[in-house]
Amino acid sequence: MHEKRIGKVSKVSGNMVSVQTDSVVIQNEVAYVRHADEALKAEVIRVRGNVAETQVFENTAGLAINDAVEFTGELLSVSLGPGLLGQVFDGLQNPLPELAQAHGFFLKRGAYMNSLTEDAQWEFMPLAKPQDKVRAGDKLGSVPEKIFTHHIMVPFGLAGIWEVVFVAPAGKYTMKQPIARLRNRAGGEQDVFLKQEWPVKIPIKAYAEKLKPQQPLVTRIRLIDSLFPVALGGTYCIPGPFGAGKTVLQQLTSRHAEVDVVVIAACGERAGEVVETLKTFPRLIDPRTQRPLSDRTVIICNTSSMPVAARESSVYTAVTIAEYYRQMGLNVLLLADSTSRWAQAMREMSGRLEEIPGEEAFPAYLESRIASFYERAGCVRLNDGRIASVTIGGTVSPAGGNFEEPVTQATLKVVGAFHGLSRERSDARRYPAIDPLISWSKYPGVIPAEQREKGHAILRKSHEVAQMMKVIGEEGTALADYIDYLKGEFFDFVYLQQNAFDAVDEACPAGRQKYVFAFICGIIETEFSFEDKSQALHFFQQLRQLFKGWNSCPFDSEEFRKTETEISLLLGQKRKAKEKSHA
Amino acid sequence: MHKVYSNIIQIAGDVITVEADGVGYNEIAQITTGRGVSLAQVIKLDGERVSLQVFAGSKGVSTGDKVRFLGHPMRVATGDDLMGRIFNGSGLPLDKGPVLTENLADIAGPPVNPIKRVIPNKMVRTGIPMIDVFNSLVVSQKLPIFSIAGEPYNELLARIAIQAEVDVIILGGMGLKYDDYLFFRDTLEENGALARSIFFIHTAADPTVECLLVPDIALAVAEDFALKGKNVLVLLSDMTNFADALKEIAITMEQVPSNRGYPGDLYSQLAARYEKAVDFDTAGSITILAATTMPGDDVTHPVPDNTGYITEGQFYLKNKVIEPFGSLSRLKQQVNGTTRSDHRAIMDTTIQLFASYRETLEKQAMGFQMSAWDTKLLKYGKMFEKELMSLEVNIPLERALDTGWQILAECFEPEETGIKKALVEQYWPK
């Protein structure tokens, strides 16, 4: 098994390198292309006869025919262990700060580093005892990591029941020192370390069962939580044309979402955006933990000018790290921006492999790849009964902003919520630009279903009236219709839109959403008496102004109560006297 | 010293295939034909078969011509010697100056480690109110000008170049009309900016494929200056020609096209260039302004569409003005909070009122009755167009903000603008 298997480069086309070899080749194993003193990481993606076709995760300039290629026998893997939180990795899990220290301004080709610092010491506390019977994923001990107790678990790849032979006593250990030894029925022994390796393309399944996502994941963005909620363990996608605010939405979510860990996969997008996240997060304090936001965040970044093949590995690396923290009983949110770039990387590779193309030259397996990626989300019951989850939210960048294209369509089939951004809304500066008329969600949210339906109904009605008004003008519209139009616009302006630059309004907790939504539902149901349209318009403008102020008041503060009273007074003036029989 | 091969087995489009060994991927070769010497780059290796794109085009290449591999990737001379010089798309002098061979740098170098970037925070003052006030340009930003053919995008690029306070201006021309090249040269010269400028010019008359090198050469030179602490402005005109050259090569190489004939890696190709824009931690910066012409004024065309996903906003040039709707500078929030206390208020208010003016124009066109408010808006819109929007206007940011207040004061009462009381008291013209 451990004899060296070697091949020779026989073809180079972009980042696709074919390797001629007489030895055994394993699909998806890692190989290194040797050129001068460099060794470039590659992955076998197709085998034909004695030629293995590999995708190289680096720029292939300079590679020549007959360069040596070394096969490793290992699938593309990541290191899982304490020290991941707060770190910034590239798509192959190389730590970027360490790379910068070693190589300066540029990402040197073929420079790889340990993902986790080998000689850092961790304070280990044993949890298991000798003779305990354990399975993959069971806790053997723990070390403190930032805000969590980081469990050291039985390696996920071990099958069946194992007996604990030895557990290290409490004390400081490095990644290189074994902290336990296990024995299986056949007598095979296995050392366990603080870290373990796991192949990124295989889901971690060391749990008892997968559950239906039921609990809402509160993002503190009203439009999402109230109308198009996301569930812990669910999936959602955000397609939108450029400039509609996909990335801003992801950034806000990464700051405010009520989860334990956020994994950000910046896949093929602008470097500047990653820079903003990685430079501001250490300074932003998470109100729930009173620690910097970076303490709960892992960033995997493969920006658009970094090697294309590593885009694919970046999303898989991210989801594997998310699954790892889920195994500790945590709720993890994975934000992938943008899955279209990953799909494009697949398209590029498929083209180089000269596969028969599907729609818009995307490969035929596009849908199944996207589906199996989103399927790694889920709410699970772990072996010890705790519930934990991985939620995946991916942005999609459809060509020309047209949602009919293959990546958007393939994604829509497999996600539980769809937040479609529209150019019209972003041009009108209505943020977040999620279009409430096309978006949907299958998950239960924080707002009772019946109230939620009322919100949808008034938006639809308002839109219909607005369309009609474009043709027949304001004069030709009935007052009752006009009021419905104003109600819808009002709901949009004061509730769906949220000011990301206002300290209070930028994040709206669930309790406040429930309270305010119920209040607005009351307004939507209210029958008003106006003399004419301009009076109605003026009334709603006043109401809007008051509400905007209300949105900036901290929940339940004195100011909040005061503004609420003002609003109620104003409402009272124009409310139609109710007939008693209805009450 | 370098091996020479002469068995060219295929010539198709501007790609030739030659049998050779020991050749590196992306390596540069020289082809000597009856018409002269051209550079070529290896774009595929398949056993002994080496495919090269010939920058001067394959016209007149004979199957017996000599191909000499140079054993290194494309390189370009860098440094102060280039200042004031004009080169062609392969880096050879177009002026009467000497060929430069010092301080050679590989083009298309590795990406910058994001850790070594800083959050952009310095504004580039252009004297154009539609940019300075409404969509501030920021050092290290990458921003295209979307326009249709015939719009004055080159004039706009030249004006920004003259007025921006940068150390080095690098112009990469792709498929540039000869007149436009002369325009750039003369304009920069008249304004005394030629001495700090470097031109890499590929004109419309040159072989199409030759323009593929232009962005990489320009950016490699820029990167070298930036690493030495200089602030560099790179102008690229027109990136649509670059994309079309990519398309041509991809089709010749029998790649499956993805969208309207463009190769599937168009996004990555464009991103590799635009992402060179950078503000280095402890060194200089590169700002990229590009012209992207939109065939048929269609922003969903693959070139502007992919560009929009990469760049940090866009200036949308239409009817000889920068259209406020559709234009966007994603980085403006980084700088417009610290210029003057009324900057954001003027930016938001005047643009909202201008949007209302546009709606009123539509109403007017449809024959609806004009209210008193509509009349005010019409007056406002006309003034805004003349005094702020026109590209003729050339005033510093502060004066542009003052002009904004004056227009508001002439057309409206303070309450009608919705501007905060404190700001009205401070700035409203008495």
Image: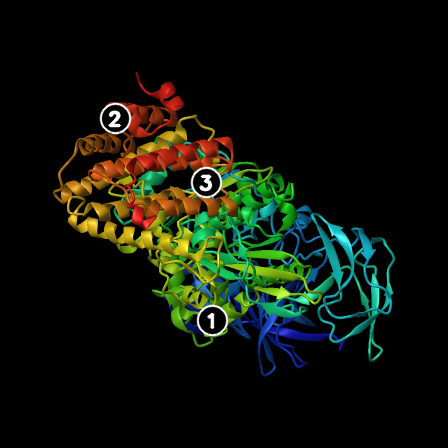
Residue A439 found in image quarter: bottom left
Mark 1, Cα crowd under 10 Å, few <14 / some 14-19 / many 20+, is many
Residue furthest to the top: B430
Residue A22 found in image quarter: bottom right
Q: Which residue is mark 1?
A: A367
**Cα–Cα span, label 2 and label 1:** 56 Å
Residue in front for this viewpoint, B62 or B320: B320
Q: Residue A126 at x, y = what percent?
A: 83, 58
B299 left or right of A417 in image: left
Q: Is residue B128 visible?
A: no
Residue B147's place in the image compared with A313, above or below, is above
Which numbered mark, 3 or 2, is in the foreground of this view? 2
Specify the color scheme: rainbow
Residue in front for this viewpoint, B270 or A127: A127
Q: Residue A157 at x, y = what percent?
A: 71, 71
Q: Amino acid at mark 1?
A: Glu
**Cα–Cα span, label 1 and label 3:** 35 Å
A170 left or right of B375 in image: right
Q: Residue B83 at x, y = what percent?
A: 47, 38
Residue furthest to the bottom: A49
Q: Name the residue at 40% across, 52% down.
A: A434
**Cα–Cα span, label 3 and label 2:** 31 Å
Residue B331's disc number = 3
Which element carries disc 1, helix, strand or loop? helix
Chain ID, mark 3: B
Mark 3, Cα crowd under 10 Å, few <14 / some 14-19 / many 20+, is many
Q: Residue A347 at x, y = what percent?
A: 47, 68
Which element carries disc 3, helix, strand or loop? loop
Residue B208's place in the image compared with A568, above or below, is below
Chain ID, mark 2: B
